[in-house]
Image: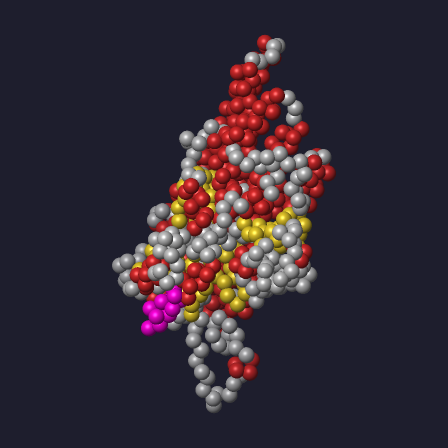
Amino acid sequence: MGSSQREVQQRQKAKASRDDVVVVGVIPEDARLEFVRLCCAEKNTAKSNFFGKEKEEEANHTKKKKKKKKKKTWIPYGTAGFRCDETAMDPIAFRCGFIAACVAAFSSKSSRKRTRASGVVVTASHNHAKDNGVKLVDGEGNVLGERYEGACEALCNATTAKELHDALDTFEEAIVEDQGNNVAEVKEEEEERTTTTTTNDDSGIVVAPVVYFGRDARESGARLVEKAKEGAKVLGNNRVEIRDRGVVTTPMLHYFVYAHGKAVEEFFAKEEGKEEDKCVRTEMLRKKIDVATHEAAYFERAAVGYLSLIEEDEEEKSADGNANTTLNNIRKNVVEGLRSNATGLPPLHIDCANGVGFVAFEKLLAVFDAIREKSGDKRSEQIELVLKNGPKDGPVNLNCGSDFVQKNQRAPDTATCSRQSFVNQRCASVDGDCDRLVYFSIEEEEEEENSSKKNFLLCDGDKLSILLAFFLIEQIFLAGLAHKISLGIAHTAYSNGAFTKFCEKNGVETVCAKTGVKNVHKAAEENFDIGVYFESNGHGTALFSKKTVEMIEKELVDELTRMSLEQERKNRRNASSSSSKSLQSVILTTKLKALLTLKATIQTINPAIGDAISSVLLIEGILRIKGNMPFAEWHAMYRDLPTKQTKVKVKDRTVIECFDSERKCSKPEGLQKRIDEILSSSSVSSSTDSSKRAFVRPSGTEDIVRVYVEASDAETCEKICTKVEEAVVEFCSF
């Protein structure tokens, strides 16, 4: 008996002896053993800590000198994957590639009768250039589910064969859970794979699951993508197909996986090519997937959505007649702030963080140019973007990008694009992988060195949420669906208190979630038919439930039918409508335009995840529909309270435990009571100041405690922050 066979028998015997574990065997044994072997082989060649190479001279150090044992580095699983120094990412990328292949091949909430996909994005988002990371995408285009996080973290940090096998066991259990705990079905699928080697639909169509790969513009990205692909190939080329999309934004890769699933779902739902034999249908499905997941489909969807969104605005400008005048008057009375502004929106200067966003926006503008040349559609001229800070202009996120702008409350300042170039312009900033967006403006050139914040205006995630939510509320009302569709905003504890009070004052429902886009996404999805969410850092979107999308589409069809019947009646009578009938026609037109606007909004939004490109198009469309709303007016919807954010170094961040969406802490005992006492103390401010707020929460990746303070003035913020920092040191220093 070979060593591999003995290893399998020993492992299965060990698993069977544990009453709390079900022996599933989802991952084929040949792939499992090869994966473990390669991981261990890579470890043995490292000469040092598995997660990094030591200096060559240390590796070759004389045996007479005793080496100092280095502490093992544990890389935690973050919001959607791993992130650290790029030199430590190779083994993690390899393992994440294998994980993604298994997710595509074996994990699916849907039926086993459908071709599946997953994704791997090599990016470190808003981190500096020397970092890199891996984000994992599930079969629906979302971040990989929480049930996998513990297993993925254990798998990527395992250093021995036993640890690897244990982590794989846990990973298999997560796959079974993802299948609805249907162990028999999972085993049946594996038996089919051993004979057909690919996912087999009942129709006879045989198409392998797909793993999509992409990366941002960092130099280390190409190397790490190759590592990840090596990991995926361990599962076997006959079990999974690899598609490398090259340099793309993170939201684009999410969209490719989402579009893959939708293409397959549509293919079988419509029974496309039903009369053809299985070979022809298989090729038809492959071509449909190829078209749906090409980057051209991504850009065209967003561009056409935007053009449809602003079509209403262009038609109103060119239309004549009393009906149109009445329509405009009705809309102005319904929604405050709608104005006529014939000058148009000024160009939008976009800071692309020296990252992939620059490349993606260039491709988007090329699509608009192609649409204009092909159809003569002048609406594509209604968006003017000035792109700054591309990949060739410097290290990603260095003194630029949305994280820099939002946290420092200042414009980017790089070697090729100085801060001065943003003065008196309408501006936006995205991050390194183009999933975050903030708008900003500098009203006038500043003369004093320390006066930078006085004239700097920022519209962060909170104000993006407000603008989008209020716009959607308007459209739902005009469409006559306000009583059928619930809409609200999900946010985190970091949202400014002025934002939540503004929402409350205007009757907009809000829900607070734990920090992290996956938590806010979940809260928006579970609590509302249309859930708007943007973290303060600008990462977010609007989620439309399936029921809501279907309702809007049905209402649109019904409204078009009514409009057609109304026109037929007018033609038969061959007479002018009465005043009441004219008003009825206007109301029908108002409802129809609102429904068309909602449909265009859905098309503009990336349906998979928050996307800075689709968000720019959506915000620009909304501002245009609202009469080319000036930036200053948007910013003045409410005034943010002064805030202060700091971090305190501690020995062990896990001593802090939080609740109430991280707005309160339960441990260490006494800390929350001390924070409450600080806030109520007259020594920091007047006891009548109801705006005072402070909370602490542990970092997810390092031993620091983050402190957030909010008050009616900056001086009070400073006083409270100092005292809270002292309390953290006192209670967390043991």
Q: Which residue lies furthest to the left in this view?
A: 19
Prevailing secondary structure of the magenta residues = helix
Q: Is residue 458 covered in magenta?
A: no
Q: Where residue 502 sits in the image (x, y, percent)?
A: 45, 44
Q: Which of 638 and 226 is in front in this view?
A: 638
Does 139 sit left or right of 439 as displayed?
Answer: left
Q: Measured from the top left, where is residue 592 in percent x and y?
A: 54, 27
| Quadrant that contains the N terminus | bottom left
Relative to 247, residue 382 above or below: above
Q: Where, quadrant-wise, is the C terminus in this rendering? A: bottom left
Q: Is residue 117 left or right of residue 656?
A: right
Q: Which of 560/38 is in front?
A: 560
Left or right: residue 197 versus residue 165 is right
Nearest to the observer: residue 666 or residue 231: 666
Q: Residue at x 43, y 60 (%)?
A: 716
User: Can residue 218 be seen from the camera position used here?
Assistant: no
Residue 547 at least partly seen: yes
Q: Up-down: is 602 above or below 400? A: above
Identify the residue shown where x is 70% and y is 36%.
Answer: 378
Q: Residue at x 48, y 36 (%)?
A: 473
Q: Which colour scheme is used?
A: secondary structure
As drawn, is 617 to the left or to the right of 376? Answer: left
> Residue 91: where, in percent of width, then height?
50, 66
Q: Is residue 726 magenta?
A: yes
Give how far across and how far down residue 380 sits, in percent. 67, 39
Q: Which residue is drawn at 50% across and 34% down?
A: 474
Q: Give the range drawn in magenta.
A: 723-734
